[in-house]
Image (cartoon, rainbow, N blue to C red):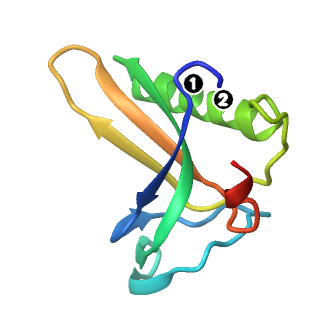
Amino acid sequence: LLGSLESRRVPAQGTVTRDSLAGTEPHPARLRKALPGSYEIRHYGPAKWVSTSVESMDWDSAIQTGFTKLNSYIQGKNEKEMKIKMTAPVISYVEPGSGPFSLSMDFLVPKRIKNNF
């Protein structure tokens, strides 16, 4: 796997996310709450995610680095050399700290291929 990328199954329940990626493959979810022009709260069942972590002092740099790693992974730079369509949601989580913070960024693996990973 690339860098600190890992593949894992997690129940992403109560995830708060923006689902505005064009050309994404949807994953079944139940809409819990929608705030027009702001965000949606959705419930996702158990799913498989591809994840990476980045430590940085700069938010923009961390987001760019995390996205670049994950994008390379879905473009075929993975153990199976399999290309994966971009999916939604993309989840980011920040573990705050007094020094560099740790950002975790996760892509949802499309339901149709999750058993191949």
Can you identify the residue that label 2 sits on?
68
Q: Amino acid at mark 1?
A: Thr
In x, y percent, where is residue 13? Answer: 36, 69
Q: CA distance from mark 2 to mark 1?
A: 5 Å
Of all residues shown, which one is farthest toward the top?
99
Residue at coordinates 74% horizontally, 67% vertically from top-left? 25
Residue at coordinates 38% horizontally, 19% vertically from top-left? 55
In the rendered structure, the answer to whether residue 58 lies left or right of residue 117 reads left
> Measured along the vertical axis of the image, is residue 47 above or below residue 99?
below
Of all residues shown, which one is farthest toward the left?
98
Q: Amino acid at mark 2?
A: Thr
In x, y percent, where is residue 116? Answer: 74, 53
Q: Which type of secondary structure does the marked residue at label 1 adopt?
A: helix
Q: Which mark, residue 43?
A: none
> Measured along the vertical axis of the image, is residue 18 above or below residue 75?
below
In x, y percent, where is residue 106? Answer: 51, 46
- Asked if disc 2 and disc 1 are in contact, CB closer than 8 Å, the reply is yes
In the rendered structure, the answer to whether residue 68 lies left or right of residue 59 reads right
Q: Nearer the viewer, residue 38 or 86?
A: 86
Residue at coordinates 69% horizontally, 62% vertically from top-left? 110
Total of numbered circles in the picture? Answer: 2
Can you identify the residue that label 1 sits on?
65
